[in-house]
């Protein structure tokens, strides 16, 4: 973390603005140091968890410095909400994006040039237009704040190619302070942000990633919709929440099903008509107790403090994505839940999507490593918060006491022999069959398919009859999660080089029991 900047004459003015506009008596954590740095004309990189108060870090300096603060944001759908909130506080704010009419654009441009604005939100695509840059050449600019700065990096979980064009800011406006802000960025993503925005040498303010009020829980996926309903009914009936699904179809089906079960729910994904999307967002922000079922298109920049739970019905693609999505719960600091179910099909699907993508090999390797880290978290038998924080380079000395593995420690057993059975079945059937067929072989189910393929005559047929189907599906999931099995086309599983040590008895394997 950066060393605090020395106190300046801006400090008293900053606190006065904080009290007068937002009603707060003091800054939280490193907010005061960041405001002091930027208000004094310096650049900064800010990593602060969702709900940590990033927006004040650019809003207060924009009011302290002469001119207008230009806020680059990818969230066109939320700009109006952010601007409306600021205007209600008496701050002269506006936005420039594709939703404005020609007259609306001219009105904002005129206010900018005449010094009648304190903050202007701009989408990156709009900022990079020659007309906008020429406008900023003539305007009194106080600072540039790049929100959701991880979008700069192709290694980030939410890469936006247009963000890389923001290198125009240091080149064209070298003497105007630049502030990059994000909730999640690993070392590689951080390096990209520093490079594109030319922030080398600028102080980096890195807050703790710990959100102690969030209880983290992961369960084996059995009947996901029913599991979700039971969770809501038992713990969060009438609370605001976000439910994430991987596909648009799943979003709509889950929202409809929750409605039939008496849960006030609404669907949100990028394929819905703009009016329907905006209505869902407005309702979520302004109503109490609404559950939004959404793809990851929903949530970035959502400023609703009392979201009591975030649920995942499908596996996210990375720890960064998971952390950012779960971080939308409990921004008011009150107890909240991050709840997820996942199963073998999730692991297979995400691994297969990665393997078949058109991304360069280096990108695929990085994304695969990110997925591995998430799966390690899911299968952890130790404190989840320690695993999560360790990924972001932060150490939690003691188990948190507020995650499922702390509250109900799972059993861990030596599963070496069963893993050998499963891996042998995979290899002897040709490294191409899915979990259902392999389970039939292991349990000795002489189905029509098993018999027609001659798999009932294999040495591994019925070798695992002592265990039930749930056990074998759980074991296969963990073998895929841990990289001993790879997922190919049509959900087929194949043994990896890593499996050899298990098969030869050179390595033991302890697994958690579901």
Image: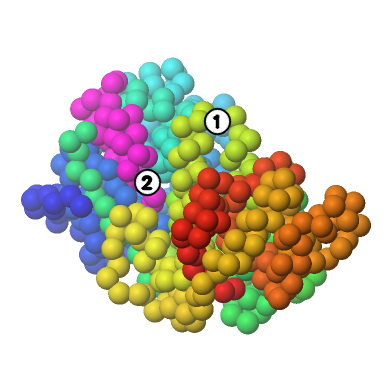
Of pointers 2 and 1, the one earlier in the residue sequence? 2
Q: Which mark is residue 359?
A: 1
For residue 174: magenta? yes
Task: Give the number of the disc on residue 185.
Answer: 2
Q: Is residue 151 visible?
A: no
User: Which of labels 2 and 1 is toward the front?
Assistant: 1
Colour mapping used in the image = rainbow
Q: Is residue 427 visible?
A: yes
Tags 2 and 1 touching, CB below 8 Å:
no
Taking the image as shown, residue 247 lies to the left or right of residue 317, namely right
**Residue 39: % across, % down:** 20, 43
Residue 373 against residue 396 in the figure, above or below: above
Q: Is residue 249 above or below residue 385?
A: above
Image quarter in which the C terminus is found? bottom right
Please state the horizontal and vertical placement of residue 353, each as a whole percent of the image.
63, 41
Q: Range of the magenta residues?
A: 170-199
Q: Residues within 10 Å of mark 2 (few under 14, many from 20)?
A: many
Label 1 secondary element: loop
Q: Quadrant of residue 274?
A: top right
In the rendered structure, does residue 178 fall within the stretch colored magenta? yes
Q: Nearer the viewer, residue 174 or 296?
A: 296
| Residue closest to the eye, 200 or 38 | 200
């Amino acid at each position: 973390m950066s060393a605090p900047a020395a106190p300046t004459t801006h400090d008293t003015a900053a606190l006065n603005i904080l009290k007068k506009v937002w009603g707060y008596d003091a800054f939280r954590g490193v907010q005061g140091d960041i405001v002091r740095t930027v208000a004094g004309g310096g650049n900064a990189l800010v990593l602060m968890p969702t709900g940590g108060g990033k927006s004040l870090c650019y809003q207060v300096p924009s009011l302290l410095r002469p001119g207008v603060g230009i806020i680059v944001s990818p969230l066109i759908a939320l700009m109006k909400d952010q601007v409306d909130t600021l205007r209600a506080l008496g701050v002269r704010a506006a936005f420039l994006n594709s939703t404005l009419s020609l007259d609306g654009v001219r009105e904002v441009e005129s206010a900018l040039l005449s010094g009648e604005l304190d903050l202007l939100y701009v989408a990156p695509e709009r900022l990079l237009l020659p007309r906008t840059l020429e406008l900023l050449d003539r305007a009194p600019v106080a600072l540039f704040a790049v929100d959701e700065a991880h979008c700069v990096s192709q290694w980030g979980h939410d890469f936006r190619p247009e963000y890389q064009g923001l290198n125009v800011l240091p080149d064209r406006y070298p003497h105007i302070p630049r502030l990059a802000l994000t909730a999640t960025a690993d070392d590689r993503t951080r390096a990209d942000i520093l490079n594109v925005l030319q922030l080398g040498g600028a102080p980096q303010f890195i807050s703790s990633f710990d959100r102690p009020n969030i209880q983290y829980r992961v369960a084996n996926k059995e009947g996901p919709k029913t599991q979700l309903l039971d969770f809501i009914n038992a713990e969060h009936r009438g609370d605001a929440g976000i439910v994430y699904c991987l596909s648009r179809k799943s979003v709509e089906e889950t929202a409809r099903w929750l409605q039939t079960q008496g849960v006030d729910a609404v669907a949100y994904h990028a394929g819905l008509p703009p009016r329907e999307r905006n209505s869902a967002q407005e309702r979520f922000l302004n109503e109490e107790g609404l559950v939004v079922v959404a793809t990851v298109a929903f949530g970035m920049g959502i400023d609703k403090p009392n979201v009591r739970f975030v649920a995942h019905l499908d596996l996210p693609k990375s720890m960064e994505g998971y952390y950012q999505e779960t971080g939308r719960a409990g921004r008011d600091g009150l107890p909240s839940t991050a709840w997820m179910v996942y199963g073998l099909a999730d692991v297979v699907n995400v691994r297969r999507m990665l393997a078949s993508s058109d991304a360069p090999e280096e990108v695929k390797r990085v994304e695969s490593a990110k997925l591995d880290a998430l799966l390690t978290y899911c299968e952890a038998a130790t404190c989840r918060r320690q695993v999560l924080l360790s990924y972001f380079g932060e150490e939690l000395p003691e188990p948190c006491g507020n995650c499922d593995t702390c509250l109900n420690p799972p059993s861990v057993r030596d599963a070496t022999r069963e893993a050998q059975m499963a891996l042998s079945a995979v290899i002897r059937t040709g490294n191409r069959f899915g979990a259902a067929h392999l389970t039939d072989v292991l349990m000795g189910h002489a189905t029509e398919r098993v018999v027609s393929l001659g798999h009932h005559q294999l040495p591994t047929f019925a070798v695992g009859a002592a265990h039930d189907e749930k056990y074998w599906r759980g074991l296969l999931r963990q073998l895929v999660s841990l990289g001993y099995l790879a997922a190919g086309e049509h959900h087929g599983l194949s043994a990896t080089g890593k499996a050899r040590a298990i098969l030869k008895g050179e390595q033991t394997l302890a697994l958690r029991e579901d």
